[in-house]
């Protein structure tokens, strides 16, 4: 679609919410929309976020020019983070060092509170999520980008994934545990989801 001079790639999927992504390296604007979403709704969605789109496409251009410096951003929705940054070895090393420096103290703090411990934590670049957990094996994976962000966001994601060692989904049981462990977890989730997966 061409919306006010901006080319937008639209993919309709069996999903409930509309998502906006800006893809490197050229700042391609991509919309994932529920199958029955009208063109008019998509146009309104893009127009309402045009300032965000322009700002982040500019940041992407700057990130290409200064590839060791991540281009911070905010998410257009509160569901799925998006991609705006090309990783370098220096950025990977810096992020991993930051996370590894924080993990021992975080685990000492949260293992007694949550009552379960991960068997292994691995760091990796993830393009669609901040972390993941396999309850059966006890393995947790954390998005490497968390090492470039506020420590409280790393803590939130770690607690979130450790809670999955008890609760597989995000239903009432999971939410009760999160509210007990980390009463401000919803605020932290909103803050995290304003960020962008690199």
Image (spheres, grey):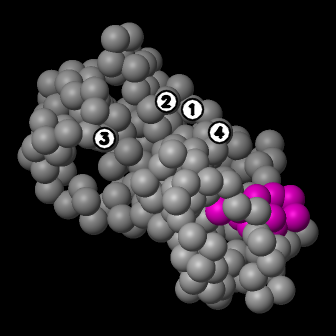
Residue 2 image offset from top left, x and y in percent: 80, 78
Q: Quadrant of residue 82?
A: bottom right
The first of marks 2 and 1 along the sequence is: 1
Dot 1 crowding, Cα within 10 Å, few <14, some 14–19, many 20+: some
Given residues 137 and 117, the one toward you in this image is 137
User: Can the viewer see residue 54?
Assistant: yes
Gap between marks 2 and 3 measured at Cα: 12 Å
The residue pinned by badge 3 equals 160
The first of marks 4 and 2 along the sequence is: 4
Q: Secondary structure at mark 2?
A: strand
Gap between marks 3 and 1 measured at Cα: 16 Å
| Mark linked to residue 123 | 1
Q: Quadrant of the N terminus?
A: bottom right
Gap between marks 4 and 3 measured at Cα: 18 Å
Gap between marks 4 and 2 measured at Cα: 10 Å
The first of marks 4 and 3 along the sequence is: 4
- Check contact, mark 4 vs mark 3: CB within 8 A: no
The tally of labels here is 4
Q: Secondary structure at mark 1?
A: strand
Q: Residue at x 45, y 59 (%)?
A: 17
The residue pinned by badge 4 equals 125
- Check contact, mark 3 vs mark 1: CB within 8 A: no
Given residues 177 and 65, the one toward you in this image is 177
Residue stretch in magenta: 21-31
The residue pinned by badge 2 equals 141
Q: Residue at x 48, y 49 (%)?
A: 15
Q: Residue at x 20, y 39 (%)?
A: 171
Q: Secondary structure at mark 4?
A: loop
Residue 38 inside the magenta-drawn segment = no
- Check contact, mark 2 vs mark 1: CB within 8 A: yes
Q: Quadrant of residue 44?
A: bottom right
């Amino acid at each position: 679609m061409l919306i006010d001079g901006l080319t937008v790639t639209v993919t309709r999927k069996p999903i409930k919410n509309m998502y906006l992504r800006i893809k490197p390296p050229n700042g391609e604007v991509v919309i994932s929309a529920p199958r029955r979403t009208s063109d008019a709704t998509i146009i309104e969605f893009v127009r309402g976020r045009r300032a965000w789109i322009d700002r982040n496409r500019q940041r992407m251009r700057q990130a290409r020019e200064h590839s060791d410096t991540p281009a911070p951003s905010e998410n257009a929705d509160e569901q799925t983070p998006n991609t705006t940054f090309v990783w370098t070895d220096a950025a990977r090393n810096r992020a991993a060092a930051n996370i590894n420096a924080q993990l021992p103290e975080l685990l000492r703090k949260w293992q007694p509170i949550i009552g379960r411990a991960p068997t292994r934590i691995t760091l990796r670049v993830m393009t669609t999520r901040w972390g993941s957990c396999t309850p059966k094996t006890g393995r947790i994976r954390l998005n490497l980008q968390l090492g470039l962000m506020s420590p409280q966001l790393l803590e939130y994601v770690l607690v979130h994934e450790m809670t999955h060692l008890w609760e597989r989904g995000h239903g009432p049981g999971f939410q009760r545990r999160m509210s007990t462990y980390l009463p401000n977890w919803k605020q932290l989730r909103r803050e995290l989801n304003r960020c962008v997966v690199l």
